[in-house]
Image (spheres, rainbow, N blue to C red):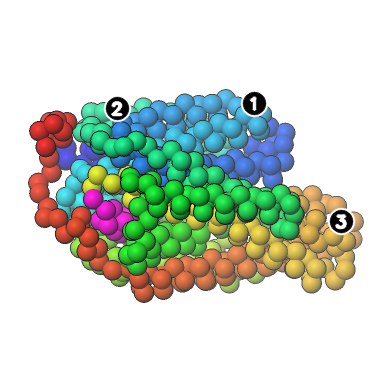
Amino acid sequence: MRKWLPLVAVCLGTFMLLVDVTIVVVALPDMAESLRTSFADLQWVMDIYALALAALLLGVGSLADRVGHRQVYVVGLALFALASLACGLATGPAALIAFRGVQGIGGAAMLATTTALISSIYQGRDRGVAFGAWGAVSGAASAAGPVLGGLLTEHLDWRWIFYVNLPLSVLAVAMTLRFVAATPARRSRGVDLPGMAAFTVAAGAATYALIKGSDNGWASATTLGLFGLAAVALLAFLVIEKRRREPLLDLSLFRQGSFSGLMVAAVLLSVAAFSYLAYTSLWLQSVRGMGPVTAGLTCLPMSLAAFLVASLSGRFLHGASPRWTVGPGLLLIGAGAFLQATIDADSSWTVLVPGLAVTGVGVGIATPMLASAALASVAPERGGMASGAVNTARQLGNALGIAVLGVVFHAGMTGALRDHGKGSVADPAATADALAGGQAGAVIAHAGPAERAAAGRLVHEAFATGLQHTFLVSGALGVLGGLVALALVRRPSTPAARRPERPAATRAEAAEPARL
């Protein structure tokens, strides 16, 4: 069993950083009350973490190729732990959001190196089993976040969603230093700092524009300026990478239809499977009256299905073409979202269960092969770059998905308030803002005693319509991702993939790069 201890060390970090993407979802109302701020303002606690992951993964992955994957992973764990402590001690929303961003930086260092470490440690069937376990953990972690967040918030305090990271981080650091061999630094002409800066600006500006677009106005100078900045930065990034001898991202990889298909699939998987959970949680707590624990437990079917299926797929689908795992997995994710779109004003939480379970099966099938196929497309010493690319795509998908689906959710509620309110709602858009900010009770209470029953019904109609639209868009994107994967993804045929396998190096051998 000793050979699996490095995998445990890597999966501990993966679990923590991905749980923290969604663990705050059910805790936001308690945070807002404790810190005396608005629910809408505290949505940045969720968004800034996703933004930091999306913007920094690619740069950190490339840096890890140069200074060593284990070294960057350990630094990321330490930074993540310190930032978690600071988040738990925060006394105001500004400090909490700032430290949450720092936590995202540590998470990026961890996520950019996890799959590269697994690929360097394990070979053959063991590698398939390891990626299956990693996929099980990563697929289940995002869905488990609301469950754990609900338990900690309701029975302890919202601050414990951050404090719980401290002992896990200490254990992960100790296990990594003890059982994971140090990876040698690779000689290079230097870090691609211009490319790193350009990509970070492009990803950050685009994500920020989408998140704040509905508040600032889609045609406002601020929103258009941010999109323009993102476009200019992306163009600069492409020009820089084209001219660099050792680029941050090897653009020639996109000449392979399979690699391009994997990147598209990674983006759409996160959007279709996870981005709507924030709005589902809002409905469960604000309209259905659930507490944080029960709202979080609603996601358990997805979490369990993803964990079990990914564990089995790594063992039994080792060697299968990613075309027949990633593609069908995304189609199942789309089907799961469509099943949840059957929600209506009279639905209870049980309407979500079949769709969440089907989505979890799709996540469990697609996630392990998505990571391993991307790594197989490059030489081992560029594993950090490939890992950073696929995880950047996933986190960009999550960050952009939250923003885009938020617009869809808001538009659906506004339309329902206008159509079903029959003129009783003076400003449907403003009322939709209040509902999206967790103020359903206040909206109903604002109506006169004689109108409260009708107002309650209207709130139920608005939420159901908003979620219907959200699930339909998520389902369509999941199906689109599945079709793209089926059309483009093939079994890797690069030299890295065809290289004959050799027995895994011992820890002592791996620690002596001069002899290799």
Please state the horizontal and vertical placement of residue 201, each as a whole percent of the image. 54, 44
- Residue 397, placed above or below residue 199: below
Residue highlighted by disc 2: 174
Magenta stretch encompasses residue 41: no
For this rendering, which residue is in front, 228 or 98?
228
Type of amino acid under label 3: Ala
- SS category of the residue bearing label 3: loop
Q: Is residue 212 visible?
A: yes
Disc with the residue nearer the chain's start (3 vs 1): 1
**Residue at 50% in and 26% down:** 85
Categorize mark 2 by other alpha carbons within 10 Å: few (<14), some (14-19), many (20+). Answer: some
- SS category of the residue bearing label 1: loop
Please state the horizontal and vertical placement of residue 106, each as a whole percent of the image. 44, 34
Disc with the residue nearer the chain's start (1 vs 2): 1
- The residue range painted magenta reads 369-379
Dot 2 and dot 3 residues touching (CB under 8 Å): no
Residue highlighted by disc 1: 91
Disc with the residue nearer the chain's start (2 vs 3): 2
Magenta stretch encompasses residue 370: yes
- Residue 133, placed above or below residue 268: above
Type of amino acid under label 2: Ala
Classified by dominant secondary structure, the portion drawn in magenta counts as helix
Please give the count of numbered marks on the rendered protein: 3
**Residue at 50% in and 45% down:** 198
